[in-house]
Amino acid sequence: QVQLLESGGGLAQAGGSLRLSCAVSGRTLSSYRMGWFRQAPGKEREFVASIRWSDAWPQYADSVKGRFAISRDNTNNTLFLQMNSLKPEDTAVYYCAAKVAISVQYHNWGQGTQVTVSS
């Protein structure tokens, strides 16, 4: 079982930056894909970015391409989301998630961290 613990959320101004971290424990991650999702008030949870742990191959939602960057530290089993050029519409609870790479559904989730972007 994979355990996930996010940190790094907070308040930022529009145009600013934040970096989220997700500490991962419990499994060897070479066969996993890790992702970031977010859920704004009154909206469904949506995909933000993901990364294949074995080779760091990333994927991004169109809404964050060019502004956000997902990365991982293989030595310390930590996932990151660098968020630049933040917009008020990026305000949401951000969740770290994990799945075996061949799975369709993410099956491990963190508790979430709040990101608030003021205009």
Image (cartoon, rainbow, N blue to C red):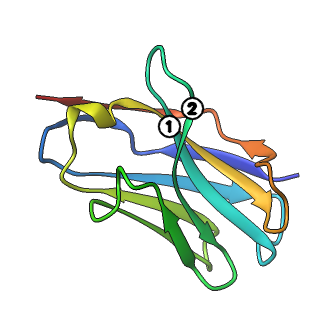
Residue drawn at (67%, 49%) of the image: 97
Please say if 42 is above or below 52.
Answer: above
In contact (CB < 8 Å): disc 2 and disc 1: yes
In screen coordinates, is 28 left or right of 9? right
Please say if 8 is above or below 54.
Answer: above
* Amino acid residing under circle 2: Arg
Element type at marker 2? loop
Residue drawn at (32%, 37%) of the image: 90
Which residue is the extreme one toward the front?
62
In screen coordinates, is 56 left or right of 1? left
Q: Position of residue 60 (x, y in %)?
A: 47, 61
Q: CA distance from mark 2 to mark 1?
A: 5 Å
The residue tagged 2 is 45
Mark closer to the chain start, 2 or 1: 1
Which residue is the extreme one toward the bottom?
55
Q: Position of residue 95 (x, y in %)?
A: 57, 40
The residue tagged 1 is 38
Nearer to the camera, 63 or 94: 63
* Amino acid residing under circle 1: Arg
- Give the quadrant of residue 44: top right
Q: Position of residue 50 (x, y in %)?
A: 57, 62
- Marker disc for residue 24: none
Q: Alpha-carbon neighbours of circle 2 within 10 Å: few (<14), some, or many (≥20)?
A: some
Residue drawn at (44%, 17%) of the image: 41
